[in-house]
Every structure is written in C-alpha cells, then in structure tokens.
Amino acid sequence: MSGCMNTVSQVKEKIAQGKKLLLAGDERVLEQLPPGDWIGGTIPYFMTEQGGMATKDQVYVTELPGTISDIAIKVYDESTLPHVYTDAAKNGFSIIIIPAMCTTHLSFALNAPNYKDFAIHPLIGWISGVHLDDLGKIKPKVFSGLTNTVLEDGAVVMHVTLPPGRVADVGILNIFEQSAGDTITFPQDGFSAREVYINGVKTNFAEYISAQHLDTRLPLVADYYGAMVNVSFQSVDAANRQVHFYAPVFAGLRYKHAKPIENYVRQFTSQMPTKLGKQIVFSCNCILNYLYSELEGKQTGGITGPITFGEVAYQLLNQTMVYLTIIDLAA
C-alpha cells in the first residue's frame, strides 16, 4: 500500500477530499499545497515503481488507510521533542520528519534513546534534505499542512490512532554486516571523533582510516542492544585529523567497519521480508544507498518511498531502509 508519485494538482485533489497524507517533494511544490491533514518534508530523490529517480516537479504521496479516522499533527522543537513518545496514541504509530543538520535533528540523534517511553510506541520517519547540488545553498524544510507551518529547525509529527484489532510494526532492513576487522570504540558520544580505541589501543581515527585504506562509503556497524545499526562517514578531515559522521557514535559500543556489498539490489531484495506486499504503509531509503549503489533507474524489490538524509525507526539510522506495516490481528 506504499505510495506513489503525484502531480501538484493530484495532491491538491487528495487534500480537498480530506485524505490523510505523508508528502515528500521539492520545497517549490510543497509550498503550493493548501492546508489539510498532511505533513511533508523536502527531498527530490525517490524510489518509485519504475526505479530510483530525481525530480523537483512531482510529490511522493503516502496515503494512510481509510480505516484510520483519528490523527493528531504536532510541531515540536528541540525542547519539546522529548515528549514525542508520551504524546503517541495508545494503539497506533507516529510519523516524524526533521530537517537535516538543524539543532533538533542533532539533538534527536543524540538523545532519542533517553526520551521518556522510548520505543514503547512505533515511531518511524525521515530526515528531509535538498538536491545535492543545493547543499549549503538551500536549507531542508518540513511542513505541517494542518497549520501551513514551514520549519527549518524543528519536527513535524503525525500521531495516528489505529482502530481496535490492528497494530503497527516498524521494520528495519540493513544490508550491512560487521566485518571481521578491528574493533573500534569511542571515548565519547558525538558526530565527530579524533582519538578512538582500535582493539583497545588509542589511535587517531583519521590517520587509521588513511593507513588502512578504509572505504568510507561503507558504514561503521554496531550492535545497539540487539539491532545492527549503521553510522555513516560524512568526511575525513586529514588536515585537522578529525572524522565526521552523519549520525552519532556512542561511547562504550563496539563498532566494526562493514563488509563490502557486491550487488546492492540483489542483497536488498534477498533480505526483503516475504509476503508483506500491500501491508507496507510507509517506507524510505537512505540517500547514501542511492548514491553509492547507483540506484537511479534500479528497482528495490517493489518497495517505494522517499530517499532521505537519514531514517528514523525509533531513533536516527543511516544507510538503511525502514518500513511500517499495519497488521490485522483478526486475519
């Protein structure tokens, strides 16, 4: 049941019909939309039924099932976002969109696991972005259709209540695995690091990456209490002997560099859960997967959705695909 690409006029029609929508598109098209039951974020990259594509003229639309009658759209900032789990419906799920690299994004990335009621209710979503040619020129944004609010720093969340007998489940598809290489630990949490411990020995990380010829297109992978989670490299600053990441590393966790991926699409489709089909309500995939695996024009197992600057499945993730399913307990 995941979404599809729409023209602006098609989206306007759905909004006029009172549909409950999750939208992704270029800022220029999202700002043309009227108020309604929708939230959205900026991005021009998408996985479609025809394969990966980039467009600034269309909107990716995820329409929530008609059986959903109760939603609450809320706008958060850095100080109020820790309430996102306690604000969730008792039986339902929440969709969150945050602009990339704003204060709220960085705070959520570092602190979400410490929020009250963390992971008690399903939370899924994505980090909005811009065309890569516009990096540093245009800021990513999020939209609340309820109030016609546009934010460069903050978060929009749609809290959804499900009818009795239905439950939501968040899935994470991570095709990366830890290699058999060195164990890397960090002395402190953060989005950058200079000194790290390689198999317990204090080492400058930038120099280690250079000496080992590490492929920084492959993420670091750690076991976050039962789930393998990626941390992607943003840059290696050799001059300042510092390494920057797209998501935070956490002190005390044991990271390893990921194994190389020979064929992204084959690896992706082989790990897709079977028989999900139209149960998938929403999904998104990472811009780094799109770039490094050259996904433009390639299909990813029939799963569609926005290509994002980060994925949210309870907390911030990198180089994954996340998806939400609704399960009918009576089926």
Image (tube, helix red, strand yellow):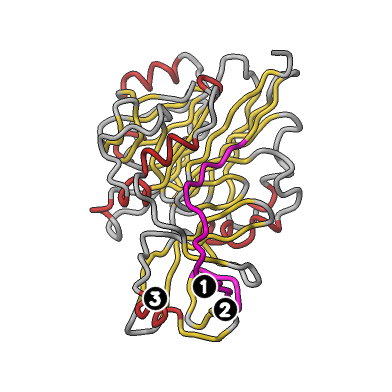
Q: Image height check: is 144 above or below 141?
A: above
Tell me whether circle 1 and circle 2 mark residues in contact (CB < 8 Å).
yes
Q: Which mark is residue 199?
A: 2
Label 3 crowding class (10 Å Cα cut-off): few <14, some 14-19, many 20+?
some
**Residue neighbourhood size for the residue with mark 1, other residues' Cα within 10 Å, grouped as few (<14), some (14–19), many (≥20):** some
In the rendered image, which quarter is residue 279 located in? top right
Residue at 31% x, 20% y: name it. 9
Q: Residue at x 38, y 76 (%)?
A: 212
Q: Residue at x 44, y 16 (%)?
A: 16
Specify whether residue 186 is painted magenta: yes
Residue underneath mark 1 = 182
Q: Nearer the viewer, mark 3 or mark 1?
A: 1
Mark 3 and mark 2 lie on one chain; the one further toward the N terminus is 2
Q: Is residue 275 above or below residue 192?
A: above
Question: Of helix, strand and loop, which mostly describes the magenta segment?
Answer: loop
x and y, in percent, of residue 7 in the image: 30, 23
Most distant residue in the left direction? 133
* Mark nearer the N terminus (1 vs 2): 1
Whole-angstrom CA distance, mark 3 to mark 2, is 14 Å
Inter-mark Cα distance, 3 to 1: 12 Å
| Quarter holding residue 242 | bottom left
Percent of width and height locating residue 284: 45, 38
Q: Magenta region: which residues? A: 170-191
Quadrant of residue 213 within the rendered picture:
bottom left
* Amino acid on which disc 2 is placed: Asn
Residue 176 in the image: state x and y as whole percent. Answer: 48, 52
* First reached walking from the N terminus: tag 3 or tag 1: 1
Residue position for label 3:
209
Classify residue 161 as left or right of residue 3.
right
Amino acid marked by disc 1? Asp
Q: Say few, some or many: other residues with alpha carbon within 10 Å of mark 2 (under 14 / 14 to 19 / 20 or more).
A: few
Name the kind of residue labelled 3 in the image: Ile
